[in-house]
Amino acid sequence: MKLFEQEELVIYNSTSKFKEKFKSINEGSVGMYVCGPTVYNNVHLGNCRTFLSFDLVFRYLKHLGYQVRYVRNITDAGHLENDADSGEDRIAKKARIERLEPMEIVQRYTIDFHQTMSLFNALPPSIEPTATGHIIEQIEIIEKILAEGLAYVVNGSVYFDVHKFNKNHSYGKLSGRNLEDMVANTRDLTAQTDKKNPQDFALWKKAEPEHIMRWSSPWSQGFPGWHLECTAMSTKYLGKQFDIHGGGMDLKFPHHECEIAQSEAALKTNPVNYWMHANMLTLNGKKMAKSTGNNILPHEIFSGNNSKLSKAFSPTVTKFFMYQAHYRSILDFSNEALMASEKGFNKMMEAYKMLSVITSSDECNFDASTWKQSCYNAMNDDFNSPILIAQLFEAVKIINSAKEGTINLDQNAITMLQDTMHTFIFDVLGLQDNLVANTAGDHQLVGAVNILIELRNQARANKDFATSDLIRDQLKDAGIHLKDGKEGTSFTTS
Ligand code: AMP
Ligand code: ZN
């Protein structure tokens, strides 16, 4: 029996605004599409939060035994500076400024994205398609929408006719808007002279002579509208209707609303059963964003090289900080919050390791099965990672009490604590033990720190406390914390 047959998962569906029991279209398998990054810049920590939120979803679905096809695209064309179909292509603009080919920009920032995700120990998606690799599929969808009479061609560009579509469908159902209100709230018409209505959106844009990212189409040499790529790629790899579509909250409108309209117009299906939206990471109370410069980059956190930080923090601690908030809550970034997360994470890992040395008793004062189920209940409740982490801290309390001898644990309880903590900490949350060397680089670090520990031991043996304290303090500044114990000195990194 697979776990998903016994655990009842509920997911908050942005469309209904309710938590709904999750039932996949095909039993035992899940199709999930998440909008990927526009690769014209290094990903900031806000972007990472959204991708890590869906890594958690991916990991838990897999843990439950589903076969998950996770598609996350790379936007390498078509995303204009301004969401309302105007301005320069973001990648082309960066290429112009840096005097590079657009594909050099795409390559550079795709690599940065992959490296960052792997430092965070996020699993790669099953398929990672690009917009430029799916121009033919996008043109086919435009042809279908035109054939339905729900788009029109003006001067080589094609626009989706939102007003006509809205006669038989409801444009705005995901974001809870209605077209009348949108019309009432729109003032600026001047920039959009090709469109019949300002609410219409581009499916294809004729390229200006200076626009270098261009493809042939029945309408002009041009490029696809940003919303279209996700409809083309999700449909191609997951079918006309699939289980989960995710992205950041800021993509709900217009991007996801337009995806629904495109699918309903071209394929006559409502494409997605569960829409999931991750909330924003803020800095100083404002959304982290590439465009405003109000952001922090992952490598600044890992190196401590940013004036907002007192020290370096590891990817695991940063991720632990993010998972201490539910994915649908706004989370504000701060040095203090990271410090607290680091302390909490280290405490959790120490307790977890303690389990292997705790002596079992014939008696047991802890109901490990009920506790284990409460970990599942937390994740079953719309992937509630903060509640899961609270449950893990319940275990920390129990382990520390057992260590102090104030309660007893039998071997069954110890084994269940060990297995369950391992499952949730490493497999589901995807955290990594800072103490364990995972890569060749880590092994070199462990080797180097061990040499310093040895030098410190010699200094202490010679009563040269100035040197021994200097080694400890300078390592601490570099994010390496020494801990003296009965078994000798160990270290954690942060
Ligand atoms: P972009 O590369 O701008 O298309 O963004 C990639 C993903 O990051 C999208 O799903 C956005 O919704 C998400 N995102 C952007 N800013 C933030 C933020 N401050 N917090 C969380 N997610 C964000
Ligand atoms: Zn998308």
Image: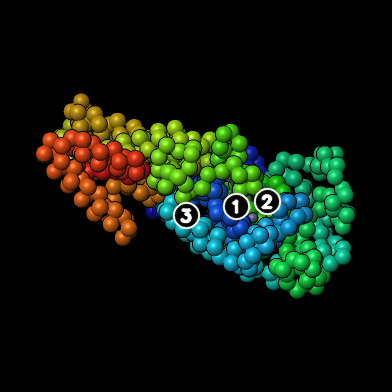
Mark toward the viewer: 2 or 3: 3
Residue corresponding to mark 2: 256
Taking 117 as reference, is 84 left or right? right
Residue corresponding to mark 1: 245
Residue 396 is situated, as x and y percent measured from the top left of the image, at 30, 34
Instruction: Please tell me the numbered disc located at residue 116.
Output: 3
Q: Residue at x 37, y 38 (%)?
A: 342
Mark toward the viewer: 3 or 1: 3
Q: Residue furthest top?
A: 406
Amino acid at dot 3: Thr
Amino acid at dot 2: His
- Of 227 and 141, the residue lying toward us: 227
Taking 20 as reference, is 398 left or right? left
Q: Residue at x 27, y 31 (%)?
A: 398
Q: In which of the image's four quarters is ligand 2 placed?
A: bottom right
- What's the CA distance linking mark 2 and mark 3? 26 Å
- What is the secondary structure assignment of the residue under circle 1? strand
- Asked whether mark 2 and ligand 2 are closer than 8 Å, the reply comes as yes
Q: Residue at x 31, y 36 (%)?
A: 347
